[in-house]
Amino acid sequence: MSETNYVKKDTFEKMKKELYLLKSVERPAASAAIAEAREKGDLKENAEYDAAKEAQGMLEAKIKYLEGVIATARILDETNIDTSHVSILTKVTLTNLGTKKQMTYQIVSEKEADLKLGKISVTSPIGKGLLGKVIGDVAEVQVPAGKLKFKVENITL
């Protein structure tokens, strides 16, 4: 995981808090569950032991992922964002030239992306296609459903 992960300060703090909980609460609970299952006898036919080991593996994978994201995180300050072009943390009002519908998205990191809240990832096809565009530009974006054209109407914070 060598990519830089751009996040806002509050998201960075949430990730650190989540990692702390995983390490200090969840990890000991997983170890205790394995120990309890081990005490119940033969490990070859112990489904509870297998389930506890699998849960521990998933927990360790999540911890490793979060550690990687935190290690490569770059905290962005919204006060330093240039709104003359589309960049991470900007809100972009677009017109879909195919449907004539207008929408507004905020370009965010993968960790913060939530389409229901109008936040799209900078690494998504639309996010990548919009980066660097200025008001009036038309972005042609290749998505799984085909090619879409968006006109950039406005860029704000």
Image (cartoon, helix red, strand yellow):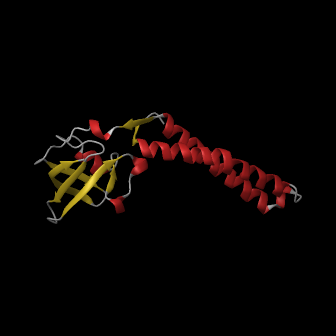
Quadrant of the rendered image containing residue 131 = top left
The residue at the point 78 percent across, 52 percent down is 32
Residue 141 vertical placement versus 134 (above, below) = below
Residue 29 vertical placement versus 47 (above, below) = above
Residue 26 vertical placement versus 84 (above, below) = below
Front one among 134 and 145 = 134
The residue at the point 35 percent across, 63 percent down is 116
Q: Using residue 152 as the reference point, say whether residue 56 is left or right of it.
A: right
The residue at the point 33 percent across, 54 percent down is 119
Q: Using residue 41 as the reference point, say whether residue 49 is left or right of it.
A: left
The residue at the point 38 percent across, 45 percent down is 109
Q: Position of residue 97 (x, y in %)?
A: 14, 60
Quadrant of the rendered image containing residue 83 = top left
Q: Position of residue 35 (x, y in %)?
A: 82, 52
Q: Position of residue 85 (x, y in %)?
A: 19, 41
Judged from this view, the residue extending furthest toward the front is 79
